[in-house]
Amino acid sequence: MYLPASGLPAAWDVDRAWAAIRAVDADVRAHPPAACVFDLAPDALRRVLPGAPLRPDQVRILPDGRWRSTTPLSEPVAQLFDLHLPLACCPPGRRLVIAHLGQSLDGRIAPAEGCSAGLTGPQNYDHMHRLRALVDAVVVGAATVRADDPQLTVRRVPGRHPARVVIDTDARLDGRFRMLADGAAPVVYCRANDTAPNPHLPAHVVQLAVRRGTGGLDLADLLDALAALGWSRVLVEGGGVTVSRFLAQGCLDRLQITVAPVLLGAGHLGIDLPEGLSQARRRPPEKRYLQGCDVLFDLDVSGERA
Ligand SMILES: NC(=O)c1ccc[n+]([C@@H]2O[C@H](COP(=O)([O-])OP(=O)(O)OC[C@H]3O[C@@H](n4cnc5c(N)ncnc54)[C@H](OP(=O)(O)O)[C@@H]3O)[C@@H](O)[C@H]2O)c1
């Protein structure tokens, strides 16, 4: 149940909700949940048996991250729980792959000349940093590294940095980009297994040789390689080519698209699959969230492929 902020119990706000989600994440990573559920108060987290009565101002969290509250919560707090608890509750070793793209009303993720910064608003950037803080690894394509020079670290909210993974099928990138050079978190560089190791990268960058797939790399092979490193929660952060390939190869569980009220008229496309999807259909509207002026659509795409 959502209420406007004026109807809020003083106890829950976005910062407390985020701290609580991080506490669930830490607990699940330390002791994967068995049959118990969590009860969350603004300042405490405890495990209880599923039938235990729920006290006022507490939030009951089921093992899959769905939640309910006996007290109405504000829309921003409810949105945080909806979008992030399923990720925080995902036990170590269980694969969960989420992609996110921010796009214009006309389906573009960046102007033709490159950088995507500022397309969506600050609330969506906060959301992205929260996703990063909950995953093991963030994946981007080589063209995104060239255009945006992203760091892929967590800076806008409290949280730990994920490992950074770049896909560069034909090993063309040089080592001058920030995520390759800054040493802020582990970096994995993925190239096709029929190319030679890239000699331009700093020594701390781990190079993975991955099978080729339909367009680019075989992404199931890549995800297996990341899982072997202990990274099973994965965020694919762009660009459009990379997210489209994950979708086409049936390697995504969730796809989040945030639409900004902007017309670019030209530029890089978001999802672009020449053959379409095998199960193209209208999506149910219930998973949609306002983030400032932007609207985020959260889609279950497990089972989809081109
Ligand atoms: N709005 C958002 O959410 C968002 C997020 C991320 C990026 N972006 C924008 O997306 C754009 C990039 O996305 P994208 O869809 O073009 O590509 P991408 O998904 O970042 O990269 C995918 C592939 O692009 C190919 N590629 C193209 N130019 C390359 C180059 N100069 N060096 C190496 N590989 C190159 C490679 O293909 P092969 O594998 O075939 O070699 C690479 O694997 C940028 O403008 C960036 O600003 C937007």
Image (tube, grey):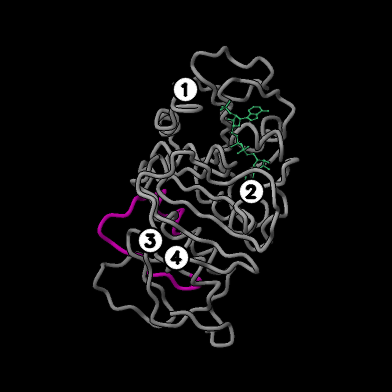
- Between disc 4 and disc 2, whose residue precedes? 2
Query: Decide: marks 2, 3 in contact (CB < 8 A)?
Result: no
Q: Is mark 2 within 8 Å of ligand 1?
A: yes
Give how far across and how far down residue 163 sits, in percent.
Answer: 56, 38
* Residue drawn at point x = 38 percent, y = 66 percent: 46
Q: Which mark is residue 109?
A: 2
Residue at the spot of label 1: 210
Query: Decide: marks 4, 3 in contact (CB < 8 A)?
Result: no
Residue at the spot of label 4: 287
Residue at the spot of label 3: 65
- Mark 1 and mark 4: Cα distance apart in space: 34 Å
Q: Secondary structure at mark 4?
A: loop
* Residue drawn at point x = 58 percent, y = 48 percent: 160
Q: Which amino acid type is marked by label 1?
A: Val
* Residue drawn at point x = 46 percent, y = 69 percent: 44
Q: Nearer the viewer, mark 2 or mark 3?
A: 2
Q: Is mark 4 within 8 Å of ligand 1?
A: no
Q: Which residues are magenta?
A: 24-43
Q: Nearer the viewer, mark 4 or mark 3?
A: 4
